Image: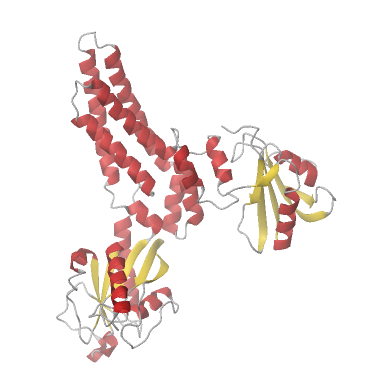
Amino acid sequence: MTTTLQPTIFALASAPGRAGVAVVRISGTAAGRVIDAMAAPRPEARRATGRFIRHPESGDKLDRGVVLWFPAPASFTGEDVVELHLHGGRAVVAAVLTALGLLPGLRMAEPGEFARRAFEAGKVDLAEVEGLADLIDAETEGQRRQALAQASGALSDLYDGWRASLVDALALIEAGLDFADEGDVGTRTFSEATSVIKVLNQAVIHHLEDGHRGEILRDGFRVALVGPPNAGKSSLLNALARRDAAIVSSEAGTTRDVIEVRLDLGGLPVIVSDTAGFREAAGDVEREGMRRSLVAAEAADLVLWLTEASAPETALPPALAPLAERTLLVLNKTDLMAGGTAPAALPDDMVPLSVTTGDGLDALIKRIAVIASERIGHHAEPALTQVRHRRLVEACRDNLQAFLDGASEDVELRAEDLRLAADALGRITGRVDVEDVLDQVFGRFCIGK
Protein backbone atom coordinates (compact mmCIF):
# COMPACT_ATOMS: atom_id res chain seq x y z
CA MET A 1 0.00 0.00 0.00
CA THR A 2 1.04 3.63 -0.52
CA THR A 3 2.80 5.20 2.48
CA THR A 4 3.52 8.80 3.45
CA LEU A 5 7.23 8.01 3.11
CA GLN A 6 7.04 8.04 -0.68
CA PRO A 7 8.15 11.27 -2.35
CA THR A 8 5.66 13.35 -4.26
CA ILE A 9 6.16 12.90 -7.99
CA PHE A 10 5.35 15.09 -10.97
CA ALA A 11 5.53 14.77 -14.76
CA LEU A 12 4.08 15.94 -18.02
CA ALA A 13 1.11 13.57 -18.51
CA SER A 14 0.24 14.70 -22.03
CA ALA A 15 2.33 14.25 -25.15
CA PRO A 16 5.55 16.30 -25.29
CA GLY A 17 5.94 19.07 -27.81
CA ARG A 18 3.87 22.05 -28.93
CA ALA A 19 0.15 21.62 -28.28
CA GLY A 20 -3.01 23.53 -27.41
CA VAL A 21 -3.13 22.11 -23.89
CA ALA A 22 -0.52 20.36 -21.74
CA VAL A 23 -1.32 18.46 -18.54
CA VAL A 24 1.13 18.23 -15.65
CA ARG A 25 0.27 15.65 -12.99
CA ILE A 26 1.46 15.70 -9.37
CA SER A 27 0.85 12.82 -6.94
CA GLY A 28 1.80 12.41 -3.30
CA THR A 29 1.44 13.95 0.14
CA ALA A 30 2.90 17.28 -1.00
CA ALA A 31 0.53 17.67 -3.96
CA GLY A 32 -1.79 20.01 -2.07
CA ARG A 33 1.17 22.19 -1.06
CA VAL A 34 1.94 22.65 -4.77
CA ILE A 35 -1.39 24.45 -5.13
CA ASP A 36 -0.68 26.48 -2.00
CA ALA A 37 2.69 27.57 -3.37
CA MET A 38 1.84 28.07 -7.06
CA ALA A 39 -1.95 28.46 -7.53
CA ALA A 40 -3.57 29.25 -4.17
CA PRO A 41 -6.16 28.84 -2.82
CA ARG A 42 -7.00 25.15 -3.12
CA PRO A 43 -10.11 24.71 -5.27
CA GLU A 44 -13.08 22.50 -4.47
CA ALA A 45 -12.25 18.82 -4.96
CA ARG A 46 -12.67 17.53 -8.53
CA ARG A 47 -13.79 20.92 -9.84
CA ALA A 48 -11.85 22.63 -12.63
CA THR A 49 -10.84 26.11 -11.54
CA GLY A 50 -8.99 28.83 -13.45
CA ARG A 51 -5.81 30.04 -11.77
CA PHE A 52 -2.59 31.88 -12.49
CA ILE A 53 0.30 29.44 -12.11
CA ARG A 54 3.10 31.28 -10.30
CA HIS A 55 6.76 30.61 -9.60
CA PRO A 56 6.96 29.33 -6.00
CA GLU A 57 9.90 31.57 -5.09
CA SER A 58 9.58 34.77 -7.11
CA GLY A 59 5.81 34.77 -7.49
CA ASP A 60 6.14 35.53 -11.22
CA LYS A 61 3.24 34.40 -13.37
CA LEU A 62 4.19 31.36 -15.48
CA ASP A 63 0.83 30.77 -17.15
CA ARG A 64 -2.91 31.04 -16.67
CA GLY A 65 -4.47 27.58 -16.69
CA VAL A 66 -6.85 25.22 -14.96
CA VAL A 67 -6.20 23.50 -11.63
CA LEU A 68 -7.82 20.23 -10.56
CA TRP A 69 -7.54 18.90 -6.99
CA PHE A 70 -8.16 15.20 -6.20
CA PRO A 71 -7.72 14.50 -2.46
CA ALA A 72 -6.82 10.95 -1.45
CA PRO A 73 -8.12 8.32 -1.75
CA ALA A 74 -10.48 9.38 -4.57
CA SER A 75 -7.80 9.70 -7.23
CA PHE A 76 -6.07 7.59 -9.88
CA THR A 77 -3.12 6.77 -7.64
CA GLY A 78 -5.04 6.72 -4.35
CA GLU A 79 -2.85 9.61 -3.18
CA ASP A 80 -3.45 13.36 -3.21
CA VAL A 81 -3.28 14.32 -6.90
CA VAL A 82 -3.12 17.69 -8.63
CA GLU A 83 -3.44 18.33 -12.35
CA LEU A 84 -2.29 21.57 -13.94
CA HIS A 85 -3.82 22.14 -17.38
CA LEU A 86 -1.54 24.60 -19.12
CA HIS A 87 -1.09 26.20 -22.51
CA GLY A 88 0.96 23.67 -24.44
CA GLY A 89 3.91 25.78 -25.46
CA ARG A 90 7.33 24.28 -24.80
CA ALA A 91 8.47 27.31 -22.77
CA VAL A 92 5.37 27.20 -20.55
CA VAL A 93 5.75 23.48 -19.80
CA ALA A 94 9.49 23.79 -19.18
CA ALA A 95 8.99 26.72 -16.79
CA VAL A 96 6.33 24.91 -14.74
CA LEU A 97 8.33 21.65 -14.53
CA THR A 98 11.43 23.59 -13.47
CA ALA A 99 9.42 25.40 -10.79
CA LEU A 100 7.99 22.13 -9.45
CA GLY A 101 11.51 20.76 -9.12
CA LEU A 102 12.32 23.61 -6.70
CA LEU A 103 9.67 22.56 -4.18
CA PRO A 104 10.86 20.38 -1.29
CA GLY A 105 9.81 16.73 -1.34
CA LEU A 106 9.05 16.66 -5.08
CA ARG A 107 10.89 14.82 -7.83
CA MET A 108 10.29 13.90 -11.46
CA ALA A 109 8.34 10.67 -11.90
CA GLU A 110 9.89 7.56 -13.39
CA PRO A 111 8.25 5.73 -16.34
CA GLY A 112 4.98 4.13 -15.22
CA GLU A 113 5.30 5.36 -11.63
CA PHE A 114 1.80 6.88 -11.49
CA ALA A 115 0.26 3.61 -12.69
CA ARG A 116 2.43 1.62 -10.31
CA ARG A 117 1.21 3.67 -7.36
CA ALA A 118 -2.35 3.10 -8.54
CA PHE A 119 -1.67 -0.64 -8.55
CA GLU A 120 -0.07 -0.55 -5.11
CA ALA A 121 -3.09 1.36 -3.80
CA GLY A 122 -5.43 -1.30 -5.17
CA LYS A 123 -7.00 1.04 -7.75
CA VAL A 124 -6.11 -1.24 -10.67
CA ASP A 125 -4.69 -4.74 -11.05
CA LEU A 126 -1.83 -5.80 -13.29
CA ALA A 127 -4.01 -6.96 -16.17
CA GLU A 128 -5.86 -3.65 -16.13
CA VAL A 129 -2.55 -1.77 -16.06
CA GLU A 130 -1.37 -3.67 -19.14
CA GLY A 131 -4.68 -2.91 -20.84
CA LEU A 132 -4.16 0.77 -20.03
CA ALA A 133 -0.71 0.66 -21.62
CA ASP A 134 -2.18 -1.00 -24.72
CA LEU A 135 -4.94 1.63 -24.83
CA ILE A 136 -2.33 4.39 -24.92
CA ASP A 137 -0.50 2.56 -27.72
CA ALA A 138 -3.65 1.61 -29.70
CA GLU A 139 -3.51 2.68 -33.36
CA THR A 140 -6.65 1.05 -34.76
CA GLU A 141 -10.28 0.68 -33.70
CA GLY A 142 -9.87 -3.02 -33.04
CA GLN A 143 -6.89 -2.43 -30.77
CA ARG A 144 -8.78 0.32 -28.96
CA ARG A 145 -11.77 -1.92 -28.24
CA GLN A 146 -9.62 -4.79 -27.01
CA ALA A 147 -7.41 -2.59 -24.84
CA LEU A 148 -10.38 -0.73 -23.35
CA ALA A 149 -12.08 -4.00 -22.43
CA GLN A 150 -8.92 -5.21 -20.69
CA ALA A 151 -8.34 -1.88 -18.96
CA SER A 152 -11.95 -2.00 -17.77
CA GLY A 153 -11.40 -5.38 -16.13
CA ALA A 154 -12.79 -7.88 -18.65
CA LEU A 155 -9.79 -10.23 -18.39
CA SER A 156 -9.46 -9.67 -14.66
CA ASP A 157 -13.09 -10.62 -14.09
CA LEU A 158 -12.58 -13.83 -16.08
CA TYR A 159 -9.42 -14.87 -14.22
CA ASP A 160 -10.81 -13.83 -10.84
CA GLY A 161 -13.85 -16.01 -11.51
CA TRP A 162 -11.62 -18.96 -12.36
CA ARG A 163 -9.52 -18.33 -9.28
CA ALA A 164 -12.65 -18.24 -7.11
CA SER A 165 -13.63 -21.67 -8.49
CA LEU A 166 -10.14 -22.94 -7.71
CA VAL A 167 -10.35 -21.62 -4.17
CA ASP A 168 -13.74 -23.32 -3.73
CA ALA A 169 -12.31 -26.62 -4.99
CA LEU A 170 -9.26 -26.24 -2.76
CA ALA A 171 -11.53 -25.58 0.22
CA LEU A 172 -13.31 -28.86 -0.50
CA ILE A 173 -9.98 -30.68 -0.58
CA GLU A 174 -8.87 -29.06 2.65
CA ALA A 175 -12.20 -29.99 4.28
CA GLY A 176 -11.61 -33.60 3.29
CA LEU A 177 -8.20 -33.47 4.92
CA ASP A 178 -9.59 -31.91 8.10
CA PHE A 179 -12.34 -34.53 8.44
CA ALA A 180 -10.48 -37.52 7.03
CA ASP A 181 -11.48 -39.62 10.03
CA GLU A 182 -15.22 -39.07 9.54
CA GLY A 183 -16.51 -41.70 7.16
CA ASP A 184 -16.65 -40.85 3.48
CA VAL A 185 -16.35 -37.07 3.90
CA GLY A 186 -12.94 -36.98 2.22
CA THR A 187 -14.07 -39.07 -0.74
CA ARG A 188 -17.20 -37.00 -1.24
CA THR A 189 -15.43 -33.61 -1.06
CA PHE A 190 -12.66 -34.78 -3.41
CA SER A 191 -15.30 -35.90 -5.92
CA GLU A 192 -17.05 -32.54 -5.70
CA ALA A 193 -13.75 -30.73 -6.20
CA THR A 194 -12.93 -32.89 -9.22
CA SER A 195 -16.26 -31.97 -10.83
CA VAL A 196 -15.46 -28.28 -10.42
CA ILE A 197 -11.95 -28.69 -11.85
CA LYS A 198 -13.14 -30.67 -14.89
CA VAL A 199 -15.44 -27.80 -15.90
CA LEU A 200 -12.77 -25.21 -15.20
CA ASN A 201 -10.11 -27.13 -17.12
CA GLN A 202 -12.27 -27.18 -20.24
CA ALA A 203 -12.84 -23.43 -19.97
CA VAL A 204 -9.09 -22.81 -19.66
CA ILE A 205 -8.32 -25.06 -22.65
CA HIS A 206 -10.92 -23.26 -24.75
CA HIS A 207 -9.43 -19.91 -23.74
CA LEU A 208 -5.96 -21.01 -24.88
CA GLU A 209 -7.16 -22.44 -28.20
CA ASP A 210 -7.96 -19.01 -29.65
CA GLY A 211 -5.46 -18.92 -32.51
CA HIS A 212 -3.53 -16.18 -30.67
CA ARG A 213 -6.18 -13.71 -31.89
CA GLY A 214 -5.67 -11.30 -29.00
CA GLU A 215 -1.91 -11.16 -29.44
CA ILE A 216 -2.28 -10.73 -33.22
CA LEU A 217 -4.73 -7.85 -32.73
CA ARG A 218 -2.42 -6.24 -30.21
CA ASP A 219 0.81 -6.66 -32.23
CA GLY A 220 -0.57 -6.60 -35.78
CA PHE A 221 -1.65 -9.12 -38.45
CA ARG A 222 1.49 -9.83 -40.46
CA VAL A 223 1.38 -10.08 -44.26
CA ALA A 224 4.52 -11.01 -46.23
CA LEU A 225 4.84 -10.11 -49.93
CA VAL A 226 6.93 -12.82 -51.59
CA GLY A 227 7.49 -13.97 -55.12
CA PRO A 228 10.03 -14.02 -57.94
CA PRO A 229 12.04 -10.86 -58.76
CA ASN A 230 10.23 -8.05 -60.58
CA ALA A 231 6.78 -9.45 -59.76
CA GLY A 232 5.79 -6.05 -58.38
CA LYS A 233 6.14 -6.64 -54.64
CA SER A 234 7.70 -3.26 -53.87
CA SER A 235 5.18 -1.49 -56.09
CA LEU A 236 2.35 -3.25 -54.27
CA LEU A 237 3.82 -2.26 -50.91
CA ASN A 238 3.93 1.37 -52.02
CA ALA A 239 0.37 1.16 -53.32
CA LEU A 240 -0.89 -0.27 -50.03
CA ALA A 241 1.06 2.29 -47.99
CA ARG A 242 0.05 5.13 -50.36
CA ARG A 243 3.65 6.37 -50.30
CA ASP A 244 7.08 5.43 -51.65
CA ALA A 245 8.12 3.14 -48.82
CA ALA A 246 10.26 0.86 -51.01
CA ILE A 247 12.57 1.48 -53.97
CA VAL A 248 11.05 0.30 -57.25
CA SER A 249 13.33 -0.67 -60.14
CA SER A 250 13.23 -2.93 -63.18
CA GLU A 251 16.59 -4.31 -62.05
CA ALA A 252 16.14 -7.75 -60.50
CA GLY A 253 17.32 -8.08 -56.91
CA THR A 254 16.76 -4.41 -55.99
CA THR A 255 15.11 -5.37 -52.67
CA ARG A 256 17.75 -6.88 -50.41
CA ASP A 257 16.18 -6.42 -46.97
CA VAL A 258 12.69 -6.70 -45.47
CA ILE A 259 10.75 -3.42 -45.47
CA GLU A 260 7.62 -3.07 -43.30
CA VAL A 261 4.67 -0.69 -43.32
CA ARG A 262 1.77 -0.57 -40.87
CA LEU A 263 -1.77 -0.27 -42.20
CA ASP A 264 -5.23 0.13 -40.70
CA LEU A 265 -7.61 -2.14 -42.61
CA GLY A 266 -11.15 -1.97 -41.29
CA GLY A 267 -9.95 -1.12 -37.81
CA LEU A 268 -7.47 -4.01 -37.74
CA PRO A 269 -3.70 -3.46 -37.56
CA VAL A 270 -1.91 -5.03 -40.53
CA ILE A 271 1.87 -5.09 -40.99
CA VAL A 272 2.92 -5.67 -44.62
CA SER A 273 6.50 -6.76 -45.37
CA ASP A 274 8.21 -6.40 -48.74
CA THR A 275 10.85 -9.08 -49.26
CA ALA A 276 13.62 -10.00 -51.65
CA GLY A 277 12.61 -12.01 -54.72
CA PHE A 278 13.01 -15.79 -54.75
CA ARG A 279 15.43 -16.98 -57.44
CA GLU A 280 18.86 -18.55 -57.80
CA ALA A 281 20.90 -16.06 -55.80
CA ALA A 282 23.71 -14.22 -57.59
CA GLY A 283 25.80 -13.46 -54.52
CA ASP A 284 26.11 -13.56 -50.74
CA VAL A 285 24.09 -10.38 -50.18
CA GLU A 286 21.19 -11.63 -52.27
CA ARG A 287 21.28 -15.01 -50.52
CA GLU A 288 21.05 -13.23 -47.18
CA GLY A 289 18.11 -11.23 -48.51
CA MET A 290 16.31 -14.42 -49.52
CA ARG A 291 17.02 -15.94 -46.12
CA ARG A 292 15.40 -12.93 -44.48
CA SER A 293 12.48 -13.22 -46.89
CA LEU A 294 11.92 -16.79 -45.78
CA VAL A 295 12.06 -15.77 -42.11
CA ALA A 296 9.48 -13.03 -42.75
CA ALA A 297 7.21 -15.45 -44.60
CA GLU A 298 7.42 -18.05 -41.85
CA ALA A 299 6.52 -15.42 -39.24
CA ALA A 300 3.61 -14.04 -41.30
CA ASP A 301 -0.05 -14.73 -40.65
CA LEU A 302 -0.69 -14.41 -44.39
CA VAL A 303 1.70 -14.84 -47.33
CA LEU A 304 0.95 -13.12 -50.64
CA TRP A 305 2.73 -14.94 -53.49
CA LEU A 306 3.04 -12.42 -56.35
CA THR A 307 3.66 -13.60 -59.86
CA GLU A 308 3.50 -11.94 -63.26
CA ALA A 309 0.49 -12.44 -65.50
CA SER A 310 2.67 -12.94 -68.57
CA ALA A 311 4.51 -15.93 -67.07
CA PRO A 312 2.66 -17.00 -63.90
CA GLU A 313 4.59 -19.13 -61.43
CA THR A 314 1.81 -20.61 -59.33
CA ALA A 315 3.93 -23.32 -57.71
CA LEU A 316 5.57 -22.19 -54.47
CA PRO A 317 9.32 -22.75 -54.05
CA PRO A 318 10.13 -25.80 -51.87
CA ALA A 319 11.13 -23.53 -48.98
CA LEU A 320 7.65 -21.95 -48.97
CA ALA A 321 5.66 -25.14 -49.60
CA PRO A 322 4.93 -25.69 -45.86
CA LEU A 323 3.21 -22.27 -45.84
CA ALA A 324 0.74 -23.13 -48.60
CA GLU A 325 -2.31 -23.16 -46.29
CA ARG A 326 -1.81 -19.51 -45.37
CA THR A 327 -0.71 -18.34 -48.83
CA LEU A 328 -2.85 -16.24 -51.18
CA LEU A 329 -1.84 -16.21 -54.87
CA VAL A 330 -1.80 -12.75 -56.52
CA LEU A 331 -1.45 -12.34 -60.28
CA ASN A 332 0.08 -8.93 -60.98
CA LYS A 333 0.53 -6.90 -64.18
CA THR A 334 -2.76 -7.99 -65.72
CA ASP A 335 -2.70 -4.69 -67.66
CA LEU A 336 0.01 -6.23 -69.85
CA MET A 337 -2.25 -9.13 -70.87
CA ALA A 338 -4.40 -9.02 -73.97
CA GLY A 339 -7.70 -7.45 -72.94
CA GLY A 340 -6.30 -6.76 -69.46
CA THR A 341 -7.65 -10.00 -68.00
CA ALA A 342 -6.01 -12.95 -66.31
CA PRO A 343 -5.64 -16.32 -68.09
CA ALA A 344 -8.67 -18.54 -67.52
CA ALA A 345 -6.61 -21.60 -66.52
CA LEU A 346 -5.36 -20.09 -63.26
CA PRO A 347 -6.61 -21.17 -59.79
CA ASP A 348 -10.02 -19.77 -58.80
CA ASP A 349 -8.76 -18.22 -55.57
CA MET A 350 -5.98 -16.23 -57.25
CA VAL A 351 -6.47 -12.45 -57.07
CA PRO A 352 -5.86 -10.63 -60.39
CA LEU A 353 -4.21 -7.27 -60.00
CA SER A 354 -2.52 -4.42 -61.78
CA VAL A 355 -0.57 -2.21 -59.43
CA THR A 356 0.15 0.14 -62.33
CA THR A 357 -3.50 0.92 -63.12
CA GLY A 358 -4.92 0.13 -59.66
CA ASP A 359 -7.34 -2.45 -61.02
CA GLY A 360 -7.96 -5.15 -58.42
CA LEU A 361 -6.19 -3.28 -55.62
CA ASP A 362 -9.38 -2.58 -53.66
CA ALA A 363 -10.43 -6.21 -54.07
CA LEU A 364 -7.07 -7.38 -52.69
CA ILE A 365 -7.30 -5.01 -49.73
CA LYS A 366 -10.80 -6.28 -48.93
CA ARG A 367 -9.58 -9.88 -49.23
CA ILE A 368 -6.74 -9.22 -46.79
CA ALA A 369 -9.13 -7.47 -44.39
CA VAL A 370 -11.56 -10.40 -44.50
CA ILE A 371 -8.80 -12.94 -43.84
CA ALA A 372 -7.43 -10.82 -40.98
CA SER A 373 -10.91 -10.38 -39.51
CA GLU A 374 -11.59 -14.10 -39.69
CA ARG A 375 -8.29 -14.81 -37.94
CA ILE A 376 -8.64 -12.15 -35.27
CA GLY A 377 -12.42 -12.18 -35.03
CA HIS A 378 -14.78 -9.97 -33.04
CA HIS A 379 -15.55 -12.34 -30.21
CA ALA A 380 -17.51 -11.36 -27.14
CA GLU A 381 -15.24 -13.19 -24.71
CA PRO A 382 -11.95 -11.52 -23.74
CA ALA A 383 -8.81 -12.79 -25.45
CA LEU A 384 -5.27 -13.36 -24.29
CA THR A 385 -3.22 -10.32 -25.30
CA GLN A 386 0.15 -10.84 -23.61
CA VAL A 387 2.78 -13.57 -23.78
CA ARG A 388 3.02 -13.27 -20.00
CA HIS A 389 -0.68 -14.03 -19.64
CA ARG A 390 -0.54 -17.00 -21.99
CA ARG A 391 2.36 -18.62 -20.16
CA LEU A 392 0.61 -18.24 -16.81
CA VAL A 393 -2.69 -19.59 -18.14
CA GLU A 394 -0.77 -22.53 -19.62
CA ALA A 395 0.80 -23.11 -16.20
CA CYS A 396 -2.69 -23.07 -14.69
CA ARG A 397 -3.88 -25.59 -17.28
CA ASP A 398 -0.91 -27.87 -16.64
CA ASN A 399 -1.56 -27.89 -12.90
CA LEU A 400 -5.26 -28.52 -13.40
CA GLN A 401 -4.40 -31.46 -15.64
CA ALA A 402 -1.92 -32.71 -13.06
CA PHE A 403 -4.73 -32.65 -10.50
CA LEU A 404 -7.06 -34.62 -12.77
CA ASP A 405 -4.37 -37.14 -13.76
CA GLY A 406 -2.88 -37.56 -10.29
CA ALA A 407 -3.70 -40.26 -7.77
CA SER A 408 -6.70 -39.29 -5.66
CA GLU A 409 -5.20 -40.89 -2.54
CA ASP A 410 -2.34 -38.35 -2.62
CA VAL A 411 -4.66 -35.62 -1.40
CA GLU A 412 -1.89 -33.28 -0.24
CA LEU A 413 -0.26 -33.38 -3.68
CA ARG A 414 -3.57 -32.73 -5.41
CA ALA A 415 -4.15 -29.75 -3.12
CA GLU A 416 -0.73 -28.44 -4.12
CA ASP A 417 -1.72 -28.78 -7.79
CA LEU A 418 -4.68 -26.50 -7.17
CA ARG A 419 -2.61 -24.02 -5.17
CA LEU A 420 -0.12 -23.76 -8.02
CA ALA A 421 -2.94 -23.26 -10.54
CA ALA A 422 -4.47 -20.51 -8.41
CA ASP A 423 -1.06 -18.90 -7.97
CA ALA A 424 -0.55 -18.78 -11.75
CA LEU A 425 -3.88 -16.99 -12.24
CA GLY A 426 -3.12 -14.65 -9.36
CA ARG A 427 0.12 -13.58 -10.99
CA ILE A 428 -1.78 -12.30 -14.02
CA THR A 429 -3.75 -9.77 -12.01
CA GLY A 430 -1.29 -9.29 -9.17
CA ARG A 431 -3.27 -11.06 -6.50
CA VAL A 432 -0.03 -12.60 -5.23
CA ASP A 433 3.51 -11.32 -4.70
CA VAL A 434 4.56 -10.23 -8.19
CA GLU A 435 7.54 -7.98 -7.51
CA ASP A 436 9.53 -9.86 -10.16
CA VAL A 437 7.20 -8.75 -12.97
CA LEU A 438 6.35 -5.21 -11.85
CA ASP A 439 9.33 -3.51 -13.53
CA GLN A 440 8.53 -5.27 -16.81
CA VAL A 441 4.88 -4.17 -16.73
CA PHE A 442 5.27 -0.54 -15.62
CA GLY A 443 8.43 0.16 -17.59
CA ARG A 444 6.35 0.29 -20.80
CA PHE A 445 4.68 3.54 -19.78
CA CYS A 446 5.66 7.08 -20.57
CA ILE A 447 6.94 9.27 -17.74
CA GLY A 448 3.60 10.94 -16.94
CA LYS A 449 1.60 7.72 -16.66
**Residue at x-position 21% and y-position 65%:** 323
Q: Which residue occupies the foreground of this view, 103 or 199?
A: 103
| Residue 206: x %, y % from top left | 26, 43
**Residue at x-position 16% and y-position 82%:** 344
Residue at the farthest left position: 345
| Residue 223: x %, y % from top left | 32, 67
| Residue 380: x %, y % from top left | 35, 47
Residue 118 lies left or right of residue 364; in this view the side is: right
Number of disc labels: 0
Q: Which residue occupies the foreground of this view, 208 or 282?
A: 282
Q: Which residue occupies the foreground of this view, 335 or 320?
A: 320
Is residue 47 among what the camera can see? no
Q: Residue 234's quadrant in the figure? A: bottom left
Residue 383 lies left or right of residue 99; in this view the side is: left
| Residue 58: x %, y % from top left | 85, 51
Residue at the farthest top position: 182
Q: Is 175 located above or below residue 431 in the figure?
A: above
**Residue at x-position 65% and y-position 33%:** 5
